[in-house]
Amino acid sequence: MNYLLTALFLVTICLPGAGQRTIEAEKVQMAKERRAILQILERQTADWNAGRVDRFMIGYWPSDSLTFVGKVGITYGYQATLANYKKRYPDRASMGTLKFDILELDLLTPNTAYVIGRYHLTRPQIGDAEGYFTLLWRKMKNRWVIVSDHSS
């Protein structure tokens, strides 16, 4: 019986292109996951620019374990993060027009990714704001969400 299993194993790994197909399938899957994350960021940008902070937050993990690290320290939890956004950006003038520049997007595992980027808020009435961010993402229940945001 062991000889049969060994022979099947050897035939499988020695099939021409078998390994290549696996690598190609992984590349296709990684590209799909990257697109999914980028689409969420695009939707967030559109929601922000339409003044919809509640919808912007859909990209975040709706959990008390969400972390947001900003200039004033660490905020824990989805509701606290949402409240801080609403407090810091109470109107369209303070929200401005958001633009993200994605500098790096890496999939660390099939269910974990991080994004490094730059944001710019064009705010003619009160002055522009800009900075950098690092987002840690997890894929949960077949959906990518931001579990930690460090923005400065």
Image: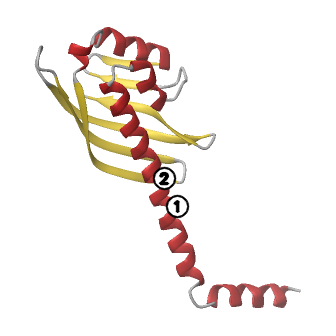
- Residue at point 56%, 86% (across, down): 17
Percent from the top left, x then y, of residue 25?
55, 69
- Report whether 106 appears left or right of 139: left
Residue in view at x 47 percent, y 66 percent: 27
Give the amino acid type for the residue marked by disc 1 in the picture. Answer: Gln
* 65, 50: nearer the viewer: 50
Q: Residue tagged by mark 2?
A: 33
Task: Please give the name of the residue rendered at 44% of the width and 13% of the height, measured from the top-left corner.
Answer: 80
Residue placed most toward the observer, 141 or 54: 54
Residue 107 vertical placement versus 91 (above, below): below
Q: Which mark is residue 122?
A: none
Looking at this view, name the residue that lies furthest to the front. Answer: 50
Above or below residue 129? Residue 100 is below
Q: Left or right: where does residue 44 sit relative to residue 131?
A: right
- Label 2 SS: helix
Please state the horizontal and vertical placement of residue 118, each as a whole percent of the image.
Answer: 23, 38
- Quadrant location of the N terminus in the rendered image: bottom right
Contact between labelled residues 1 and 2, with CB atoms less than 8 Å apart = yes
CA gap, disc 2 to disc 1? 6 Å
The image quadrant where one finds the C terminus is: top left
Give the residue at mark 1: 29
Q: Is residue 5 left or right of residue 136?
A: right
Indicate the colouring scheme. Answer: secondary structure
Label 2 environment density (alpha carbons within 10 Å; few <14, some 14–19, many ≥20): some
Please give the count of numbered marks on the rendered protein.
2
The relative height of residue 94 versus residue 139 in the rendered view (above or below) is above
**Res. 40 in view:** yes
In which quadrant of the rendered view does residue 70 lie?
A: top left
Q: Can the viewer see residue 77 in this picture?
A: no
Q: Quadrant of residue 93?
A: top left
Give the answer, above or below, for where 65 lies relative to 89.
Answer: below
